Amino acid sequence: MFKSLREKFKGMFAKVQNSDLRGSVVSLQDFAAVKLAAEKGDAIARNNLGVTYAAGQGISKNDAAGKEGQKVEQNYTEAIKWFRLAAEQGNVEAQCNLATLYYYGRGVDQDYAETIKWLRLAADRGDTIAQFNLGEMYAQGLGVAKDQKEAERWHKMTERGSQDVMDAHKAKKNKPF
């Protein structure tokens, strides 16, 4: 079963791109309101603010004169700050986003142990993508001792969970994330 699951997901992971982060990019029109909500402790706003900073997006609609709106500059330090605040509140998307940034060393030193920490929190809450990626970390011995039994355990949870992993990682290379 483990081999067939690995075959299903073969070729599904690629390097992190801003589209790999989970959450919504905040439009420039909504940026101030979302930032205020984030500052007041809203975990979803915090995660979405992190996505916006990581992506360097948030372009407003063209104005009446046809000029393009402004853009939020990419800033991984700010992204990590907001992801961490949301992740510590239990926001699974933010936990996965932090794991992704630690895996690739975006805005932080690459750190597989931190990747594992945040993946495990999301995986324990039933996130199938985190479960699959955690299984891959064990299968490849990244941040943990290589352990095929543990990898298989996480992959089986993924298989029982849903089709989300297949949908989210279609056409990517065989790596976590």
Image (spheres, grey):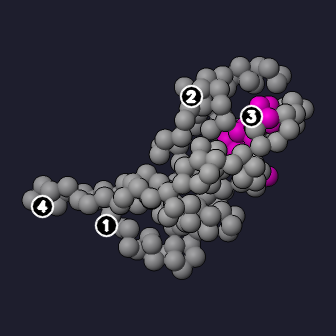
**Reading the chain from its start, which is encountered first: label 1 or label 3?**
1
Q: Quadrant of residue 98?
A: bottom right
Residue 116 placement, left or right of 81: right
Q: CA distance from mark 4 to mark 3?
A: 50 Å
What type of secondary structure mainly makes up the magenta span?
helix
Which label number is shown at residue 136?
A: 3
Tell me residue 14's x, y (percent).
56, 32
In this rendering, is residue 134 above or below 106? above
Distance from disc 2 to disc 4, alpha carbons, whole Å, reads 40 Å
Mark 4, residue position: 64
Amino acid beneath label 1: Gln
Q: Which residue is mark 1?
A: 29
Q: Earlier in the sequence, mark 2 or mark 1?
A: 1
- Residue 139 magenta-highlighted: yes
| Cα–Cα gap, marks 3 and 2 | 14 Å
- Image-quadrant location for residue 153: top right
Q: Position of residue 70 (x, y in %)?
A: 26, 60
- Report, in whole angstroms, how far the alpha carbon at label 1 lies from the one at label 3: 39 Å
**Residue pointed to by mark 2:** 172
Q: Secondary structure at mark 1?
A: helix
Mark-to-mark CA distance, 2 and 1: 33 Å
The 10 Å Cα crowd at callout 1, few under 14, some 14 to 19, many 20 or more, is: some
| CB contact under 8 Å: marks 1 and 3 | no
| Nearer-the-camera pick, 114 or 47 | 114
Above or below, comparing residue 89 to residue 16 in the picture: below
Q: Quadrant of the N terminus?
A: top right
Q: Quadrant of the C terminus?
A: top right
Disc 2 marks a residue whose amino acid type is: Lys
Point out the stretch of residues depicted in magenta: 124-141
